[in-house]
Amino acid sequence: MRRSLGILASASLSAALLAGCAHGQVIDGNTVVPTPTPNPKEVTSEYVPPTANSAPTGLVKSPDGTLWFTEKNGNNIAQLTTNATIVEYPVPTAGAQPNGITIGPDGYVWFAETAGNKIGELAMGGTAVVEYTIPTAASQPVGVTTGADGSVWFTEQAGNKIGRIDKSGNITEYPIPTAAAGATSITLGSDGALWFSETAANKIGRIAPSGSVTEFPLAASSAPGEIVSGADGALWFSETGTAKIGRITTAGAVTTYPIAPGTSISGISLGADGNYYFGDPTTNAIGQFVPGTGIVTEYPIPTAASGVGQLILGPDLRIYFAETAANKIGQFRYF
């Protein structure tokens, strides 16, 4: 079943699909770009963390073929293994609200503790979490990513800064020119700079490794959310306030594409097929956006009111997504 250009297909999910969503193989050995097959595009599996109401939030794939994610309410860092098992590791600081997550240059899992005002680090083997306190109090770190300089970079939503932490745990902060910008997501661009969304300021920011910040304005009320690097060298992002997909070149040229009337957009991820996939909380669906044509097609999530959020391209080239409200991790097959 799919929703294309605002037209909702009338068929319902089969009982077989719903049964298949209870479990599944995470990694199928596919490590090459997929070719078209007769397989339907659909949510094939949903995985439930052991902790109830854990609120899965951030997602990242690791070199060992597994997925890691944060449990914002569960206060855990969790690993979805290749045999579809979820293992949880508690964050030492109570009520830390782990949020964004990345794999650092050291191969460890790094994550932002939004309420704990810390950056955490966890070895792949699940050894003790190391935490680093951010100098600015109540800075509310949200997004994290690994930079080309071998450091981890993060956004400070309330501190109105971009932070950098090196492998020794030393933190440097750089102020954002626009006051109360509400920086959230951050990613490494093809130009070697870090690009981030200023959700409250309706801007996309760029910070050079030296710390110099440049800002690019968007339309009013656009509220940019997740930002990712595209296959074309540009940055692609979700406009959560206007239900659009945005594209900005490294030179600052912005283009936007509306999704469809009556829809919304949360996270965004580049698929192995060159298309972009996004979450639609309003219709409770995974959307596919084809850059060359602008065609949008949506596919339903079996669990109602899932609260779909961030998406990530998994090690098996499937799209994985956080069902924050439903306490699940979903898997979407598109080839």
Image (tube, helix red, strand yellow):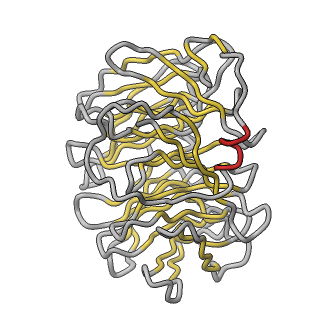
> Nearest the camera: 43 or 230?
43
Quarter in which the C terminus is drawn: top left
Quarter in which the N terminus is drawn: top right
Asked if residue 9 is positioned above or below residue 22 in the image, the reply reads above
Query: Residue, x 57% and y 43% (percent of image)?
Result: 182
Query: Residue, x 57% and y 50% (percent of image)?
Result: 157
Q: Is residue 215 left or right of residue 264?
A: left
Can you name the residue that lies furthest to the left here? 191
Splitting the image into 4 quarters, where does residue 260 fall? top right
Please provide percent x and percent y for residue 299. 59, 29
Please provide percent x and percent y for residue 289. 45, 24
Q: Look at the image and tell me whether residue 135 can be seen.
A: no
**Count of all numbered marks drawn on residues in the image:** 0
Asked if residue 99 is positioned above or below residue 119 in the image, the reply reads above
Q: Is residue 74 left or right of residue 243?
A: right
Q: Is residue 114 left or right of residue 192?
A: right
Query: Residue, x 70% and y 21% (percent of image)?
Result: 11
Query: Residue, x 44% and y 46% (percent of image)?
Result: 176
Please provide percent x and percent y for residue 287. 54, 29
Please provide percent x and percent y for residue 290. 39, 22
Splitting the image into 4 quarters, where does residue 98 fall? bottom right
Can you name the residue that lies furthest to the bottom here? 128
> Nearest the camera: 285 or 237?
285
